[in-house]
Amino acid sequence: MQLHGWEAALFYVLAIMTLFMAVFVVTARVAVHSALFLISTLVNVALLFILLRAEFVAGVQILVYVGGVMVLFLFVIMLVQTRAEEEARVRLYTGQTWPAVIIALLLAMSFYFAMSPAQVAFRPPDTAAVATEPPDSSERATAGAGLNISKDTQEVGEQLYRQAALPFEVASLLLLVAMVGAVLLARGTKQEKLYD
Amino acid sequence: MIGIFSGAFAYLAPILLQAEPSFAKRFEPTLINFLMLSFLLFVVGVAGVLSRRNIIIIFMSIELILNAVNLNLIAFSRYLELNKDALTAKGLAVNPLSGPVFTIFIIVVAAAEAAVGLGIVIAMYRNRETVAIDEIDLLKW
């Protein structure tokens, strides 16, 4: 998957934006700022999905995460947070900051040593295969480009309702259970007395 | 800061070491670059989960981790889609669309997890008047 030209530049811009916003999510002092940075991270990841030609997942990401989950987060922050002038004095981190840094460094080391030999293996294998059958891959690329309409949503939908129909139904059941559970957990003593 | 520099080092070292003749071509993102990005996102999320004190920000870090996994799945799916012919010629059965399908299920589970988790946060705030995880230590001995 070699991206060329402006796509490569766009990848680096989006990657750096995503990483900086993620770091800001973790280090922000006020929780609302953290939530806003998380929205920015999620939008950047959605743009990366579009760069990877997964438009449907990008749309779902925007709708579900930015539209649903983050609104939930903001509501809970609004319900729970103390006042902003108190937040200026409160301690941000537990005493676990150094263990966290060490674990992150160990993870980075292990990933580096796992990936540097694999760098060669993740080269696109068609560099060897192109010599034997060159028209095949280029034909697919031009056929997609000629229509100018992405088939991604259609294909994902077919896959979701044919191969993954049972998990799809189970997921809807999971969402129902989560909804009922969240309502039960979040109701106060007044509502409990009202309905018991 | 240390994390950022070590991440940048881990990211740039294999790129600068590889034997590609043209300098600009070395920086064209391949699968490995997406894996690196998703890994760094994952590490930032893990650091947030381990070090922050506010439980809501810990939940946001979990969302970061799940997003890193999603990015990984989509990148592998794109890789399989582009190299499908070469891989099937080698006798491997590839299905590039299972990446997006898994991603959708992960998003569903993340939404359910956020709803239940934030419900727990509200219930806990009602009982203890705090969201700092080191003050919620009833089960600690």
Image (cartoon, rainbow, N blue to C red):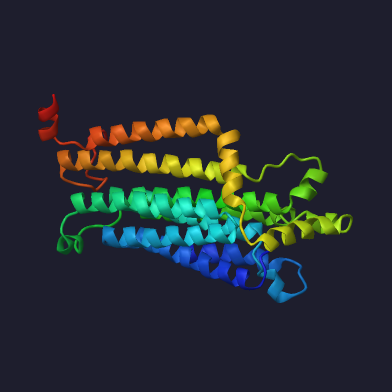
Taking depth in this image into account, of B83 and A31 the one nearest to the observer is B83
View extreme (top): residue = A196
Question: Does B100 appear above or below A174?
Answer: below
Task: Report the side of B108 relative to B8 (left or right).
Answer: left
Taking depth in this image into account, of A116 and A188 the one nearest to the observer is A188
The answer to whether residue B47 shows anywhere in this view is no
Where is residue A177, by image quadrant? top left
Taking depth in this image into account, of A60 and A118 the one nearest to the observer is A60
Quadrant containing the C terminus of chain B in the rendered view: top left
Point 89% across, 55% down: residue: A132
Where is residue A133, by image quadrant? bottom right
Question: Does A185 appear above or below A76?
Answer: above
View extreme (bottom): residue = B23
Question: Does B77 appear above or below A12?
Answer: above
Residue A121, x across and y down, in percent: 74, 53
Taking depth in this image into account, of A53 and A93 the one nearest to the observer is A53
Residue B138, x across and y down, in percent: 22, 35
Quadrant containing the N terminus of chain B in the rendered view: bottom left
The answer to whether residue A97 shows anywhere in this view is yes
Residue B113, x across and y down, in percent: 37, 40
Task: Report the side of B69 relative to A25 (left or right).
Answer: right
Task: Report the side of B93 relative to A12 (left or right).
Answer: right
Point 85% across, 59% down: residue: A134
Residue B49, x across and y down, in percent: 38, 49
